[in-house]
Image (cartoon, rainbow, N blue to C red):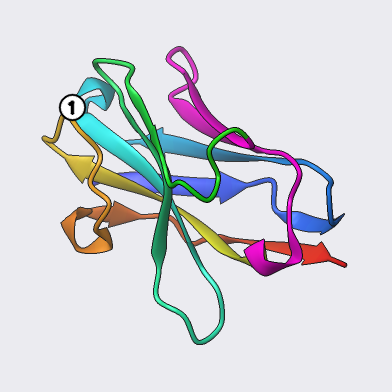
Amino acid sequence: QVQLVESGGGLVQAGGSLRLSCAVSGRPFSSYALGWFRQAPGKEREFVAGCSWGRGSTYYADSVKGRFTISRDNGRYTVYLQMSRLKPEETAVYYCAADWGSTVPSWSAKEYDYWGQGTQVTVSS
């Protein structure tokens, strides 16, 4: 059984930074594509960033390019999302997800097999 546990959310002022962490346990780590998604109240869950664990490639939504960075710690089986210059409209619950057997992270939430519980990020204006 795969488990993903997010941490690092909180309250930050506009323009500030936060780093989210996602600890992954269970099936072999190198067989996942990993993604970060977010969901604001009343909105659909949207792709933020992803990485291909084995290849190390990274992918970003246009809205976060240049401000967010996804990275991983192989030894700790953890993936991070460093968020900078945050905006109030980025207030949402942020989720980590794993797509088993994929080499490229999908932009569609439906493609992911495992999800964390989410962590709240609130950006005040």
Q: Residue at x 84, y 56 (%)?
A: 14
**77 is higher (above) or lower (below) than 94:** above
Task: Count neighbours of disc 1 (C-alpha within 10 A) and say few if under 14, some if 14 to 19, many if 20 or more.
Answer: some
Q: Is residue 27 visible?
A: no
Range shown magenta = 67-90
Secondary structure under the numbered disc 1 in the rendered image: helix
Residue 71, magenta (yes or no)? yes
**Residue 105 drawn at (x, y percent):** 25, 39
Residue kind at label 1, given as amino acid type: Ser
Q: Residue at x 64, y 37 (%)?
A: 67
Q: Is residue 89 left or right of residue 97?
A: right
**Residue 28 drawn at (x, y percent):** 22, 25
Q: Residue 2 or 54: which is nearer the viewer?
A: 54
Q: Residue at x 16, y 29 (%)?
A: 103
Q: Is residue 93 visible?
A: yes
Q: Which residue is mark 1?
A: 31
* Residue reaching furthest to the bottom: 42
* Residue reaching furthest to the left: 101
**64 is higher (above) or lower (below) than 79:** below
**Residue 115 drawn at (x, y percent):** 35, 56
